[in-house]
Image: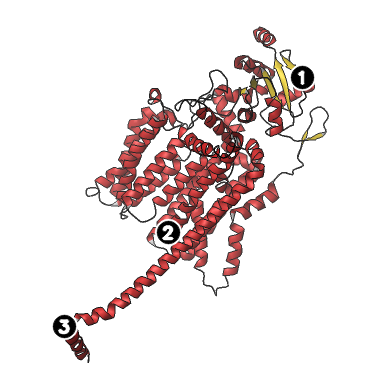
Amino acid sequence: MISATVMTVSEQTGDPTQYWKQNTVPETSRRRSTMKFFSESQARLLQVICLAGFAMVVLNGLKTVPQITDLFLAGDGDNQMRLVQVRDWLGGQGWFDVRQYRVLPPEGISMHWSRYLDSGIAAVLRTAALVWPMPKAELATLILWPSLLACLMVPVLVHGNNRLFGPAAAIGALAVFFSWSKLGGEFVAPRIDHHNVQILCATALFYLSLVQGRALILGALGGVATAFALAIGLEMLPFFATVWGLVALRHAFGEDSTGDWLVGFGVAIALAAPLLMAGQTPLSAWGAGYCDVLAVPVLALGAVGVVSTLIPVLGARVLAGPVVRIAALIVTTAMGLWLTNPLLGHCLAGPYSEVPPEIRNTIEATITEALPVSSMLADFPEVFGRILLPPLVIFGMAVVAVLYLRTRLSRRQWIALLQAFLVTGVGFGFALVQVRAANLMTPAIPFLGGFIVHAFTQVPRASLLRVPVVILLLLGLPATIEGGVTFFLKPSSATKLASGSTGQTQPRLSCRNAAAMAEIASLPPSVLFNPVNLGATILVATNQSVTSASYHRSADAFWNGVGAFQSETALRDALTKSRADLLVICVGGLADGEAMLLRSLKASRLPIWLKPEPGDRKLVAVFKIDKIALAAASDAP
């Protein structure tokens, strides 16, 4: 029968093989059409997810419009100082000159910030100024800049999680991003400091090191992202070192394409890092051994990383097997660190290595984000809970999800999960010393959140577990956890501050607002001796100069705002050295610096070298510094 059929086709076509072609091609076409349908359907789904993410970014931005001025003045001083730096550059200050001359004038203080970030913000500001007058354009920039970065973060999370666990994981990652204030809060107005750009670059590297593709190009992109993030600031350095080292270990165990990835990464960072350093550092400072910016010590450390990770790759035929490759990695790293110790050894104590011990202690005791976990738990339990409890809960839920899916995970998925768990562990370990190091785990937590949602989709629809799992997912959302923490631990809004003279309570007020800044702006142009927490706010909201701001390269700028208020003698010495004209404190009661000394002096007696400055002011107290009397008091035995 078959023979007859073939013969019939042969007679008609002259080729028996045409029978098989005519009957198999339609089936292949149907399969291709089905695959194309599902591919296009998933692409459309991802587009919808991204659009939903963009819509959330827009809503977050619009929500801040009515209160943007208040949010900005009451918020982080780094955002305020960044705008001051951008204004100065647009006003004619040199690209390589990043000193802030209005702190301790006329010399100013050295800043360790990057002009690359200033240029991006300035581009948005100049564009906004085409539509609005400059004051409104600045406020618009405070919303637009973090929103633009959030819009870049959305596709990174969506496509990265989809490549590893599918669309459900992409949705879960976005849910974590938008609901965890430590992460999503870095991408909302008025956050124009450097942390969001660093987190964006770190998140890009996290997925570039895991997704499949042209490994050489993926590694090169990762190297450029790493170099740029380090040019912005060094806070994420432990994260980059962790991911780089993990890829090197994966190569040691023979994972395909990791060698090409390491080559691309190594070449890219070896070229990009020095170029980026040269692009923002004056030629005279190229050899400076700064530990808080991309400079010679970090370049030396990067060179050690490039050499030690590429030796096992380039010598793969000789260095066969994981034990030999890991040994080569360890030995070359140790030798490299020993050889470069003269260049980077002084940086082992951290970015504050050249800061006097008393100032270092002041920084670690007064800057909330620099506190260890033990101090945060004792003094700011709500802040601790909002920052660290969500990732701990997500970590635990992800472990349970891994146990549930352990027999259904691919090798690449296992690697991705192990990397996420290790990154989270490294971030939490550093956070035990300084809570701001929680940023190190921010690239991994959305990934783990996405995996948890993916695990939920693997629970059969008929299973009785689905309802309790949904409840757990809702309870595990960072927004839910933070809401619970706030409800149970946040101090009452009626918190009072006891008055030293009457023992009665008074409402706490802050001077980081438009009304208080208007009182300071109405003063004659002066150099103001100020508590440290008011420094950046005064700079951005007035034309006054200050003597204190919380930037570690100037020991005096730190000491003037904190240590100088600890005793009358310390205050007298600091006033003499600073050459300030007026002293300004907040009378409301919030600890805007350690101004309790002056509040108590105001209630009893003032030194002869301080005179109340007349004026109708309700939020700030201003004192004229009698420089003749101050000099006489300083010379007295």
Residue 516 horizontal/vertical position (percent): 71, 30
Taking 66 as reference, is 94 left or right?
Answer: left
Give whichever of 134, 192 is nearer the camera: 134
Taking 141 as reference, is 228 left or right?
Answer: left
Which of the marked residues, 2 or 3, is nearer the chain's N terminus?
3
Q: Quadrant of the C terminus?
A: top right
Give whichever of 337, 620 is nearer the camera: 620
Looking at the image, is 179 positioned above or below residue 513? below
Q: Quick check: marks 3 and 1 in contact, CB under 8 Å? A: no
Say which of marks 1 and 2 sits in front: 1
Mark 2 lies on a secondary structure that is helix
Residue 162 horizontal/vertical position (percent): 45, 59
Q: Which residue is mark 3?
A: 14
Specify whether residue 543 is in view: yes
Instruction: Give the alpha-carbon distance from disc 3 to disc 1, as whole Å.
Output: 111 Å
Give whichever of 534, 256 is nearer the camera: 534
Residue 134 horizontal/vertical position (percent): 58, 34
Q: Which residue is mark 2?
A: 164
Instruction: Give the alpha-carbon distance from disc 1 to disc 2, as whole Å.
Output: 67 Å
Which of the marked residues, 3 or 1, is nearer the chain's N terminus?
3
Mark 1 lies on a secondary structure that is loop
Question: Image quarter for residue 406?
Answer: bottom left
Q: Amino acid at mark 1?
A: Pro
Which residue shows up at 50% across the image and 52% down it? 154
Q: Which residue is mark 1?
A: 614
